[in-house]
Image: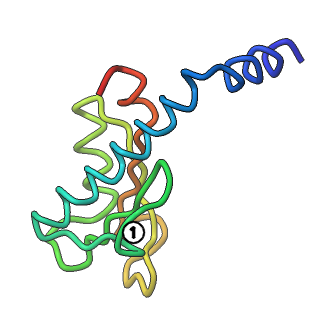
Amino acid sequence: IAAKAVSFKECAEPEFKVYQQKVLDNAQAMVKEFQQRGYKIVSNGTENHLFLIDLIDHNVTGKEADAALGNAHITVNKNSVPNDPRSPFVTSGLRIGTPALTRRGA
């Protein structure tokens, strides 16, 4: 209960709205950059804190990308994409969120 109270208090602060806007701005900037580099984004963009990259046309699986980025201490998740030809244990998608990098000052 105490953790919820602290969380609700933080959400009520004016700075939280600014932080949330930065989270969204960072996600949209990353989407734009990935698209410019030839990656397809499921839903062609994002309206929130995360997005899903479709790797079907690239020579890497979601599992491989997740592992490689994890080795670089970048947390992402492998994820299935619509009509994914790969198994749910391998996947053709990579889900990226921006709250952590925004919290660190990005």
Q: What is the x, y in percent for residue 103?
A: 42, 23
* Residue that extends furthest to the front in the rendered view of this protein: 14
User: Compared with residue 1, is residue 101 higher up or lower down, i.e. above or below?
Assistant: below
Q: Is residue 24 left or right of residue 40?
A: right
Here the colouring is: rainbow
Which is nearer the eye, 95 or 8? 8
Q: Quadrant of the C terminus?
A: top left
Question: What residue lies at 50% left-to-right and 53% top-to-bottom?
Answer: 48
Dot 1 alpha-carbon crowd within 10 angstroms: few under 14, some 14 to 19, many 20 or more: many
From this view, report whether residue 42 is shown above or below residue 75. below
Name the residue at the left extreme. 37
The answer to whether residue 36 is left or right of residue 7 is left
Identify which residue is drawn at 26% across, 53% down: 65
Q: Residue furthest right?
A: 1
User: What residue would you read off at disc 1?
Assistant: 91
Q: Is residue 45 left or right of residue 60?
A: right
Identity of the amino acid at label 1?
Thr
Q: Quadrant of residue 84?
A: bottom left
Q: Against 34, is 30 above or below? A: above
| Quarter that holds the N terminus | top right
Q: Quadrant of residue 14?
A: top right
Q: Position of residue 105 (x, y in %)?
A: 32, 21
Of helix, strand and loop, which one carries label 1? loop
Residue 72 placement: quadrant = top left
Give how far across and how far down residue 78 sits, in percent.
Answer: 41, 57
In the image, residue 15 above or below residue 22? above
